[in-house]
């Protein structure tokens, strides 16, 4: 990212932290959805095997 003021690294760090937090949220949400889908498949397989 280009910075109009090379001495303003605090703003750049805030942008970086925000982007990192957004990626973490996205990964955690994807993991939760994958886990729920896996649980659904396990439940369905259990029902089918009865």
Image: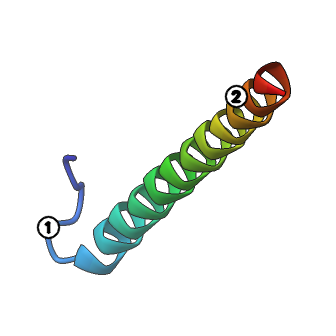
Identity of the residue furthest to the left in this view: 6
Q: CA distance from mark 1 to mark 2?
A: 53 Å
* In-image side of 32 versus 16 (left or right): right
* In-image side of 2 versus 12 (left or right): left
Identity of the residue furthest to the top in this view: 48
Residue at 32% x, 80% y is 10
In this rendering, the answer to whether 30 lies above or below 12 is above
Give 25 or 43, whichever is nearer the viewer. Answer: 43
In this rendering, the answer to whether 20 lies above or below 30 is below
* In-image side of 25 versus 23 (left or right): right
Which type of secondary structure does the marked residue at label 2 adopt?
A: helix
Q: Horizontal and vertical percent for residue 49?
A: 76, 24
Residue at 48% x, 48% y is 27
Q: Residues within 10 Å of mark 2 (few under 14, many from 20)?
A: few
Which type of secondary structure does the marked residue at label 1 adopt?
A: loop
Q: Which residue is mark 2?
A: 41
| Colour approach in the figure | rainbow
Label annotation for residue 26: none
In this rendering, the answer to whether 8 lies above or below 37 is below
Residue at 62% x, 45% y is 35
Residue at 22% x, 65% y is 5
Q: Looking at the image, is mark 1 or mark 2 earlier in the sequence?
A: 1
Q: Does the residue at mark 1 contact the one at mark 2 (Cβ under 8 Å)?
A: no
Give 35 or 11, whichever is nearer the viewer. Answer: 35
Identity of the residue furthest to the front in this view: 50
Q: Quadrant of residue 15?
A: bottom left
Please tell me how many numbered marks the rendered image carries.
2
Q: Horizontal and vertical percent for residue 31?
A: 55, 47
Q: Nearer the viewer, mark 1 or mark 2?
A: 2
Q: Which residue is mark 1?
A: 6
């Amino acid at each position: 990212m280009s910075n109009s003021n090379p001495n303003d690294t605090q703003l750049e760090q805030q942008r970086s932290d925000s982007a990192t937090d957004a990626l973490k949220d996205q990964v955690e949400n994807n993991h939760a959805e994958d886990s729920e889908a896996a649980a659904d498949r396990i439940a369905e397989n259990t029902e089918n095997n009865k």
